Image (cartoon, grey):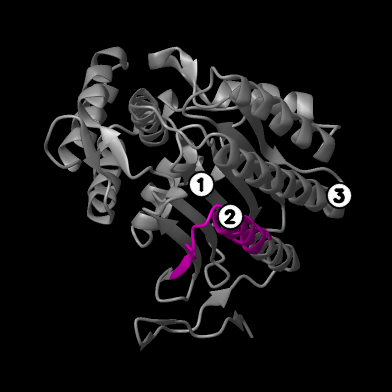
Amino acid sequence: MPYRGPASVVSGATLPAVIYAQSSAAVAALTLARSLQRRMVDAQEGVARAAGDAARFAEVTWLRDDGRHGGGNRWCVGDTPVFDRASVNVSQVHYDDDPARQLASATALSTIIHPRHPHAPSVHVHVSWTEMRGGRGAWRVMADLNPAIADTGFARVARERFGAALQAAAPAVYADAAQRGDRYFFIPALDRHRGVSHFYLEQYATADADADRAMASAVAEAAIDVHAAIVGEALGALRRVAEDDRARQLAYHTLYFFQVLTLDRGTSSGLLVHDQNDVGILGSLPSHVDRGLLASWRARVPAPIEQLVDALLAALPAGAGAVPVSDDAKRALAGAVRTFYRAHPAALELQARGDIVPPTVANHR
């Protein structure tokens, strides 16, 4: 019998029980993802409490095909003294009842923390296990530090600490993963990287499945813990915020938005596969972007990406300067991305890549 999770209650309504993937590897991956999710939420709530912010993350759940093919939950918070936006997502999608599909299951933790303080860096952590029909599977492991203001002494020390923590967590693969991360998170149109310290492994699998899972866990735990420590120190030492700091943070948040929606393969793949979790998939977006700055980058992108930039602008609220990225805007942005890539599937080749294109992207073109 397929494993069913407990029914979820949202706003007084009981949702159907979720059916999770049956393979032992997928079960182990989901257990790991949930453990890391709890670790991230606990760490960030601890940072907030220490800063006098009583913010608590709230859970939102979603179902894939009414739970028949899995689903997930995210713990999120925003618009507080400590958090601009934060989203800690776990999902599992599977096709145990459809043996014709190549993809058996995909289990993922995907999280982004955007602190409100301009000198407290954002962090992105992603750990996923993708299992193909027949049991062959591999890990995707990402962790990157993303300061809005990267040219201060504090930011430089934070970069060194973050990289050192990841290197200690995965010494055998760190050099390769850092190089791949620098490649993946480069933004050609802007001639710069999204962040300052990047770790990226794609399609990672050795003969030792337990060691692979332990490595993925160690990298995520290290990123979660060192980032929380860095943000805690930033909030304690850098209380004053200049007006220029806010402007630089808005510009960086616009860059983050631009990179996610025009270059990130994981985001595009998730949106193209289904439309049942658009707000969750775009949970990595910050609360506001500079609409004028985004429009100015249209001339820098290769054809036909300028059409995607136009569509993103149309999905955002009208106005000059800072505009909010609400849940309604996220739904409109998700639709814009889907419409564009369905009309221009070859444009997927212009997205960021490491050495390998993930099969979940290739299989859903």
Q: Is residue 282 above or below residue 152?
A: below
Quadrant containing the N terminus in the rendered view = bottom right
Q: Which mark is residue 211?
A: 3
Which image quarter: residue 156? top right
Q: Residue at x 64, y 49 (%)?
A: 127
Question: Which residues, given as a range, are shown in magenta?
Answer: 36-60
Report, in whole angstroms, how far the alpha carbon at label 2 lies from the one at label 1. 9 Å
What is the number of the mark on residue 86? none
- Name the element at disc 2: helix
Mark 1 highlights which residue?
Answer: 113
The numbered mark, 2 or 1, whose residue comes first in the sequence reads 2
Considering the numbered disc 1 on the image, is that residue within a helix, a strand or a loop? strand
Question: Is the Cβ of the residue at disc 2 closer than 8 Å to that at disc 1?
Answer: yes
Q: Which residue is mark 2?
A: 44
List x then y, in percent, for residue 334: 30, 47
Q: Which residue corresponds to the image point at 69% horizontal and 58% vertical from the top-left?
A: 134
Closer to the eye: label 2 or 1: 2
The three-letter code of the residue at mark 3 reads Ala
Mark 2: amino acid:
Gln
Q: Position of residue 308 (x, y in %)?
A: 25, 31
Which numbered mark, 1 or 3, is in the foreground of this view? 1
Mark 1 touches mark 3? (CB < 8 Å): no
Image check: 32 left or right of 300?
right
**Badge 3: few (under 14), some or many (20 or more) residues near its Cα, within 10 Å?**
few
Which circle's residue, 1 or 3, is located before the other in the chain? 1
Can residue 64 be seen in the rendering of this structure? yes
- Find residue 210 and report its horizontal and vertical position in percent: 85, 55
